[in-house]
């Protein structure tokens, strides 16, 4: 109690999360690293339910889903197909680090070939201008794939809650 885990200090996705935070965009976070967006310093996440569930839950609530590439392939892709078929207003943000970050860093297949039908916008994690243009809500579904490489040997950081 009194402590939380947050993203690695050198996490490539900090810029995207900072943009979401400054725009007050609340996301449903998926299991995996995305769940850490619920904690300081970003605090953009409002809920998490299980691997691959953020897309379905966000489509019926916040309109913003934050999911990792593995979670998307594992079980989130079915929900993404449904969202596009029904033309629901959802911004699906995929943190693509090509690894199962919370389970030992095992490699993940390249996701773009599986979601090409969604015409995703692909941004480098360190391209702030492209991220600012891409991370906006639409009237229909949109998918943004943010590509970043996790620092070798990096670990989640533990922070003490000081402002509670």
Image (spheres, rainbow, N blue to C red):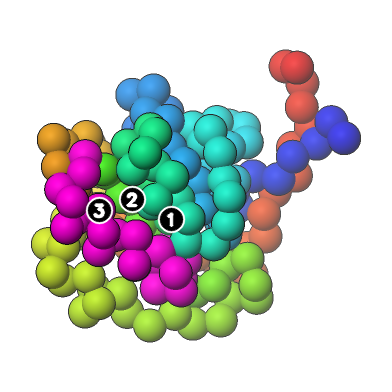
Q: Which residues are magenta?
A: 68-89
- x and y, in percent, of residue 19 in the image: 35, 33
Give the farthest residue toward the front.
86
* Residue bearing mark 2: 93
* Residue bearing mark 3: 83
Q: Specify which label sits upstream in the sequence, 3 or 2.
A: 3
Give neighbour class at mark 1: few <14, some 14-19, many 20+ (Cα, 10 Å): many
- x and y, in percent, of residue 4 in the image: 74, 39
Whether 47 is drawn above or below 53: the answer is: above
Whether 164 is drawn above or below 63: the answer is: above
- Mark 3 vs mark 1, CA separation in Å: 15 Å
> Residue at 47% across / 61% down in the picture?
52
Which marked residue is nearer to the observer: mark 3 or mark 1?
A: 3
Q: Are marks 1 and 2 in contact (CB under 8 Å)?
A: yes
* Residue bearing mark 1: 67
Q: Main secondary structure of the magenta part?
A: helix
Identify the image quadrant of residue 51.
bottom right
> Residue at 43% across / 55% down in the picture?
67
Of the 4 image quadrants, the one containing the N terminus is top right
Q: Specify which label sits upstream in the sequence, 1 or 2.
A: 1
Q: Is residue 104 magenta?
A: no
């Amino acid at each position: 109690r009194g402590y939380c885990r947050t993203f690695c200090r050198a996490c490539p996705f900090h810029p995207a999360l900072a943009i979401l935070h400054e725009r007050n965009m609340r996301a449903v976070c998926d299991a995996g690293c995305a769940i850490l967006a619920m904690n300081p310093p970003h605090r953009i996440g409002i809920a998490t339910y299980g691997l691959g569930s953020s897309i379905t839950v966000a489509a019926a609530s916040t309109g913003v889903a934050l999911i990792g590439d593995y979670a998307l392939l594992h079980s989130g892709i079915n929900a993404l197909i449904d969202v596009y078929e029904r033309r629901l207003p959802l911004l699906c943000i995929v943190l693509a680090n090509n690894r199962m970050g919370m389970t030992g860093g095992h490699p993940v297949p390249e996701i773009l070939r599986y979601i090409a039908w969604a015409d995703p916008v692909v941004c480098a994690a360190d391209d702030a201008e492209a991220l600012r243009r891409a991370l906006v809500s639409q009237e229909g579904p949109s998918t943004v794939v943010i590509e970043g490489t996790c620092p070798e040997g990096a670990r989640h950081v533990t922070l003490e809650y000081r402002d509670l």
